[in-house]
Amino acid sequence: MTFWLTQIFNGVSYGAIVFLLAMGLSLIFGVMKVINVTHGTYFLVGAYFGLTTLKQTGNFFLAILIGGIAIAVMGIVIERVFLRRLQGNDLGQVLITMGFVLVLQDAILVIWGPDPVSMDAPKFLASTGRIGGFSFPMYRLFLIVFAAVTAAALWFFESRTKIGSSVRAAVDDVEMAGGMGVNVPVVFSLVFGLGSFLAGMSGVLAAPWLGIQAGLDFEILPFAFVAIIVGGMGSLKGAVVASLLVGIIDNLGKTFFPEFAYFTLFLPMAVILAIRPSGLFGRAM
Amino acid sequence: MTDNGPMLKVEDIHTYYGDSYVLQGLSLEIAEGQVMAVLGRNGMGKTTLIRSIIGFTKPRTGKVTFDGADITALQPHEIVKLGVALVPQGRRIFPSLTVMENLLLGEKEGSDDGGEEPWDMDRVLALFPRLKERLRNMGNQLSGGEQQMLAFARSLMTNPKMLLLDEPTEGLAPLLVRAMGETLSKLKESKLAILLVEQNMKFALASCDYVHVLNRGRVVHSSTPEELAANEEIKSRFLGV
């Protein structure tokens, strides 16, 4: 029983990280139809920004904020200066986001060096919680709560605010949104900024657990892609459910069939897509 | 507002879709309060004309002036802000927005300077009472007729000076086409300029003050609706009737 609780708890905590990353990817794809390959690298660069902030200030929550903001600014600049010129040119966009992966990975080597680094969680989160015979790292519980609060905030933004309805309109039909007076370039920047913020922030949040090292970006990006493909592009509910599924399935897979780790993740994805090509909660594109 | 000049002036525009050359030097003018119909067979450039005005597909050369301002190079949202509203072909209601959200999306306060009462939620719902019962429904839960009402209603919520109507009767039952005609004649009483692109010649001629016929991206005939109705040669050559 405790074994299963631990596995599921770990799966849900990993799912929380995947959700934060996937939601940004999903927003960006939903509104701008850009497959942002750089998204995983945003996660990694965000973690490094967080690390530097933590070293300078000792404030973990400031590190989360700065990691998010730095990546948001970077994302908005990349969108405005590069991606916007390639609107409608899918291949060009994928290529340029891939190019930024290489540029950023090299920048990391130059600025932060090639060695893996670790980052400490704040003391009050470094303890171990205990409920009966089930013990768990407090920090992972914090991750789950943090992701849940973020999901609630995003839901409120999307469904209860005027800007949120403009964003949904742009997901539905970006051209017609412009034809109704929605300032589409501003919505694009906002969405790209928000999506990038979530990526940078999730990198900092993951660092005390997963560490920070070259290659982590492409380790985690497939999980985010699986989550939004399974959940349905642009769907918040889908991203929540699918991220949890991805986290739990991956954890159980790695525990029981470590040599087939990717198989246990991608097989369910293939099955779900075969039955529902637009994902669990997605609309037909 | 310009003094006596046309509300919309399209001057010699040439618009392409990729490599295909659709509008080949099209010009027309619409005055305040005028209902102008544009007829033509499929593929003759009617929708492209609408897209060129609202800024979806920019003309390569030529000029579009609205209410005295050159809008040729503006973004669609800027053109909408100046007072152009679109009721697009196929309605293009936002499915993940409620009817209420669809209406509020482009909401813009009107000015009372013309003496004309501005459009707001109450006035729009009075014109389309059916939508009142549907406010909480999602955009994709409406019937075709209701979608057309919503497409109309949300365009009015922007308090436009000009409406672009792209085949508003397409796919509507005869009863609803008649209702659409009544709506148009009500709107005509306000000073709204209306550009009506249609396949349904009977409907267009009954609603408009003046009519242009398009063929291969050019205006090939311009007259009053009565004159066109009597001109069998133009009708058979360019409209297939």
Image (cartoon, coloured by chain):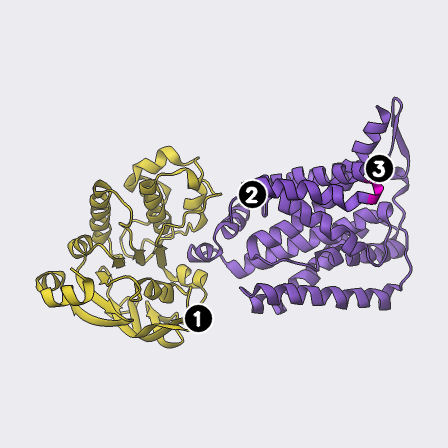
Chain colours: A purple, B yellow
Q: Which residue is mark 3?
A: A255
Q: Is A257 a magenta residue?
A: yes
Host chain of mark 2: A
Q: Residue at x 44, y 68 (%)?
A: B74
**Alpha-carbon distance for marks 3 and 1?**
54 Å
Q: Is residue A150 visible?
A: no
Rendered view: B189 above or below B124 = below
Find numbered disc 2 in the image and state the secondary structure of the residue it sits on.
Answer: loop
x, y percentage for residue B43?
31, 64
Q: Which residues are magenta?
A: A254-259
For the residue pair B181 and B106, the one nearer the viewer reads as B181
Mark 3: which amino acid?
Thr
Which residue is denoted by mark 1 in the rendering? Answer: B18
Asked if the residue under mark 3 is in contact with the one under mark 2, i.e. CB atoms within 8 Å, the reply is no
Left or right for A37, reference A235: right
Q: Is the Cβ of the residue at disc 3 closer than 8 Å to that at disc 1?
A: no
Which residue type carries mark 1? Gly
Name the secondary structure under disc 1. Answer: loop
Q: Which residue is under mark 2?
A: A282
> The N terminus of chain A lies in which quarter of the figure?
top right
Give the chain letter at badge 1: B
Lower sequence index among marks 2 and 3: 3
Q: Is residue B115 left or right of residue B138?
A: left
Instruction: Tell me the CA gap for discs 1 and 2.
Output: 31 Å
Q: Residue at x 41, y 45 (%)?
A: B103
Marks 1, 2 in one chain: no
Question: Residue A176: within the magenta?
Answer: no
Mark 3, other Cα within 10 Å: few <14 / some 14–19 / many ≥20: few
Q: Position of residue B51 (x, y in %)?
A: 37, 63
Question: Are callouts 2 and 3 both on one chain?
Answer: yes
Question: Alpha-carbon neighbours of circle 1 within 10 Å: few (<14), some, or many (≥20)?
Answer: few
Q: Is residue A2 visible?
A: yes
